[in-house]
Image (cartoon, grey):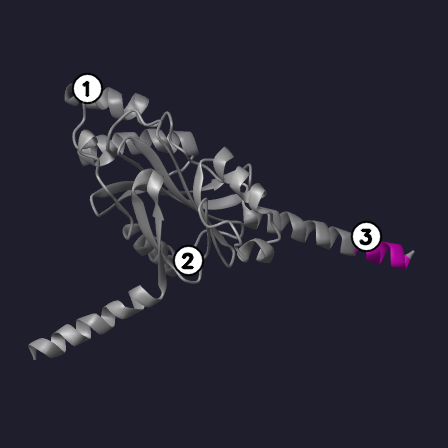
Amino acid sequence: MKYIKIILISLLLIPNIIYAKSITISEFDLTININDEWDIFTRDNLINNDLLTKYNVQMDEVLNNMKENSIYIDAIMDDYELFLRGNNEAEINNLTNYKDSDINLFAEELMKKTGASDYELLKSNGITYVKSKYIDSNLGAYLVEYVTIFNRNNITFTIQNYNGFPTSEVEKELDEMIKTTTIKLNSLYEKENNSTNFYTNIIYTGIIGAVVGGLIGFMNTKKKNSKQTTSVSESEKIDKSL
């Protein structure tokens, strides 16, 4: 019976191994498992990447966009686009060093910055994310965003779509994917340097360098190209009718 249980557990784990890619971003000592249905670009996998042809983009174009917008992962699945952005401009060491009551204050200030109306705290592998949903009016995009600070790095996962927010099933899958993220803790940042001033640190300096909001990505380009094609098509119809 003991061995049967072990076999059954192993079988349950196999789909996670087969149907997910483990992506490591060395700049942040970060690893995430992204489901196989996503087309994934990183700064390190662009050379001879067949996906560039699929999306009709050049390697330099993608790399420059990544560097200009602090992007380290750009992944596409159907009408969804996932970005991992980050920088080392955080003014606090680690969001998980704080109590939930302090993180809630941070989240409320973050909501003012993004325009989101609600949020929740998502916790996994020693990482605390502020998760929120909102519409980026500049892009006309619907965003689900996961923001954290870890090892004095601002780190944000953003999933955007132009047709609406994800269904509850897709959102659950996204949550589970984000939960697979692991980041190696730098011992220098295990505690905060100024434990007596948590309130000031987390509210007034914690959100300064946060990377939030929608981005011009492959889906945006595809949307624009689609509009242009439709526009040309309509023009041709008018010309023929004349």
- Quadrant for residue 201, please give it: top left
Task: Give the Cα separation between the discs numbered 1 and 3.
Answer: 63 Å
- Read off the residue under disc 3: 235
Q: Quadrant of the N terminus?
A: bottom left
Q: Is residue 220 left or right of residue 146?
A: right
Q: Position of residue 216 (x, y in %)?
A: 55, 41
Foreground residue among 215 and 183: 183
> Label 1 sits on what residue type?
Asn
Near mark 3 (Cα within 10 A), the count class, few <14, some 14-19 or many ≥20, is few
**Dot 3: element:** helix
Task: Give the Cα separation between the discs numbered 2 and 3.
Answer: 36 Å
Task: Give the Cα separation between the discs numbered 1 and 2.
Answer: 40 Å
Q: Is residue 171 visible?
A: yes
> Label 2 sits on what residue type?
Thr
The magenta-colored residue range is: 234-241
Near mark 2 (Cα within 10 A), the count class, few <14, some 14-19 or many ≥20, is few
- Read off the residue under disc 2: 167
- Read off the residue under disc 1: 197
Near mark 1 (Cα within 10 A), the count class, few <14, some 14-19 or many ≥20, is few
Q: Is residue 133 left or right of residue 235?
A: left
Q: Is residue 151 left or right of residue 157?
A: left
> In the image, is residue 145 above or below residue 97?
below
Number of the front mark, 2 or 3: 3
| Mark 1 / mark 2, whichever is N-terminal | 2
